[in-house]
Image: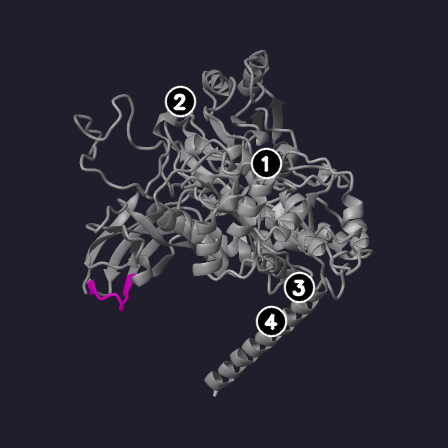
Amino acid sequence: MKKIALIFVLLFCFSTTFSQKNEIDRKVEELLQKMTLEEKIGQLNQYSGDSEATGPITINSNKQSEIKNGQLGSMLNVKTVAHTQQFQELAMQSRLKIPLLFGLDVVHGYKTTFPIPLAEAASWDLEAIELSARIAAVETSASGIHWTFAPMVDISRDPRWGRVMEGAGEDTYLGSKIAMARVKGFQGNKLGDTDAVMACVKHFAAYGAAVGGRDYNSVDMSYRMLWETYLPPFKAALDAGAATFMNSFNDLNGIPASGNAYLQRDILKGKWNFNGFVVSDWGSIGEMITHGYSKDSKEAALQAITAGSDMDMESNAYRNNLAELVKENKISIDVIDDAVRRILYKKFELGLFDDPFKFSNPERQKAALTNLEHTKAAREVASKSIVLLKNDKNILPLSKETKTIAFIGPMVKPKRINHGFWAINLKDVDSSYIVSQWEGLERKVGKNTKLLYAKGCSVAGTDKSGFKEAIAVAKKADVVILSIGEAFNMSGEAKSRSNIHLPGVQEDLIKELQKTGKPIVILINAGRPLVFNWTAENMPTIIYTWWLGSEAGNAIADVLFGDYNPSGKLPMTFPRAEGQIPIYYNHFNTGRPSINDDKIYKSAYIDLQNSPQFPFGFGLSYTTFIYSDLKLSTQKIRSSETIEVNFKLTNSGKFEGEEVVQLYLRDKVGCVVRPIKELKDFEKVKLAVGETKTITFTIDKSKLSFYNDKLEYITEAGEFDLMIGSSSEDIRLISNFELVQ
């Protein structure tokens, strides 16, 4: 009976959804019939508000009149109810009263700022990541905004690239899971709800492989690498229901992404049947001229619209050229209609035609931006994102009975820096809600502990004049906490770095403080993996805090004093030197692998180890975990069958804690070279002291499939190594199985 009821509910939901889709389709077609060519082209243009920019500014003094004339479909960088309502009122003066879409780069929170996405990825906590996007959507939608230019799902294996802070790191499987979680969080139950925003999956595609880690640069890779490594997170986001996609600045196979029909027509709208719309990145259609792919703006417009770019962000190529191209019969009106249809559909789906101001509610905005539950969640997610790299002498967690603490470093007292790059600048909102690292510690220790402060040095520069004060302060303390790293604006868009060492004289300060003999806890704030070899090798206690958002101070204090046991794991490999880059755990083997650092006619550096400073998936806890009793339900399967993998995980330490258990597979022999290991599953497990849980993974065809040299997605008979561990290098349990035909 229950099964019948469930089937009935599913059929009802399907029929309702289908009916709604048909109704929207009908309304879109009716509106299309009423639109002039100029009005249609207007829907394909997006302008930035003049208050701030996230790219090269295009001067256009006619924005307001063009909105009134129905010549604009969308705006970005317009925020708050007051400003979005102002522009929407202009749109309501147009002939057909087609509402504007408002988009904004809400990358890791709106008012309540969560950790940068790379830091969130370090939590390996999909529920927490979805919650962060959910709260961002609630606050964003309450401020009159319909659309976020997130998530960024680019895989990147190069920490020199500034935009690694915006993604989930180097791994395809982890990145795909996070992409799905963030889309679900942003879009909520359904588009049209006033607590949901449209997700925009970016950057399509392969932007994370920019040559030399240099932003906006070319990408050179095989199509097999594209399909195997870089496309899966985009497909995962699409499967989660992503409403829109954004193309990328790079070229692929010599063709800029904005004009790349293989990416947009063949894959996205063809093979994957994507029915949303594609927006260009800022000015990227016009930049095809500079690429040397388009001779002028008119040709760029022709190439982009033909290739599947539906909306032109800020290049004015569509506004200035599409009408003429249609009149010259160089572009079919059907191509224009297809792009317009996709955009109008989303406006209807959001309910903007029924009420253009449905998202502009001052009371809802105030309630969303003052919700204390959002603050609580930001603190929890920030705590989960912290990675304990070293705790050799068990200095951590600190005792709350510690009498004197010296808190030193350039990151201690500032507030807004904790937001990291891509934070939303809300000019009308006081920054006092951001918890500095000093404030977090001060609240944690209370009146019984004396806190001493010294800046020590700046993030960059060569000035060591502050060392003397820092050393004097350190000598007075029982323990020293040193907060250092890169400035928040050293990572992000257009923030590529050739040198990713700790900047300035910060490492020199560490060396001087070490001479005091005091226990020192190092906090490293950054938007990417940094190189800090001397510190990594000589300092026993290191925490990677990334940029944690508005609750950074409280979260760091929670971890320092053991109110939260750190559980973060690295989503990117940390190199020893820039010369190792790109460095990633799931690399292909070679005919001459270097085993145990053998360098004689082997694939090795003569002046450096091949191994990273810290591997993918690595992160310590205040407790310890024992892995035991690995069992496989079978050791031979056919592609239609599955293997159940069971093992026991025990908390053998003195603290309650969480462990991210990781399942890796290796296809030992293939028709193409396969990676030395690949993450294929993981689970974050919470255990009380002494508690044991049985963990179960299932291996099916999807975990064994890959792309061959003909780009066929296949499974292949053969032997597989199975590895379960605490990181990509810390493998605790090993077995094997065979796939038979």
Answer few, some or many: residues within 10 Å of disc 3's Cα (few below 14, many 20 plus, some between 14 and 19). Answer: many
Mark pair 3, 4: CA separation: 13 Å
Q: Nearer the viewer, mark 1 or mark 2?
A: 1
The location of residue 574, given as percent across then percent down, is 40, 34
| Residue 699 visible in the displayed image | no
Mark 2: amino acid: Trp
- Measured along the vertical axis of the image, is residue 436 above or below residue 366? above
Mark pair 2, 4: CA separation: 60 Å
Quadrant where the C terminus sits is bottom left
Mark pair 3, 1: CA separation: 30 Å
Answer few, some or many: residues within 10 Å of disc 2's Cα (few below 14, many 20 plus, some between 14 and 19). Answer: few
Answer few, some or many: residues within 10 Å of disc 1's Cα (few below 14, many 20 plus, some between 14 and 19). Answer: many
Mark 3: amino acid: Gly
The numbered dot on residue 704 is none
For marks 2 and 3 on the same chain, the one whose residue lies earlier in the sequence? 3
Find disc 3 in the rendering and name its residue: 192
Mark 4: amino acid: Lys
Considering depth in this image, is 371 or 706 the residue closer to the camera?
A: 706
- Left or right of 71: which side holds 281? left
Answer few, some or many: residues within 10 Å of disc 4's Cα (few below 14, many 20 plus, some between 14 and 19). Answer: some
Find disc 1 in the rendering and name its residue: 420
Residue range (magenta): 636-645
Find disc 2 in the rendering and name its residue: 534
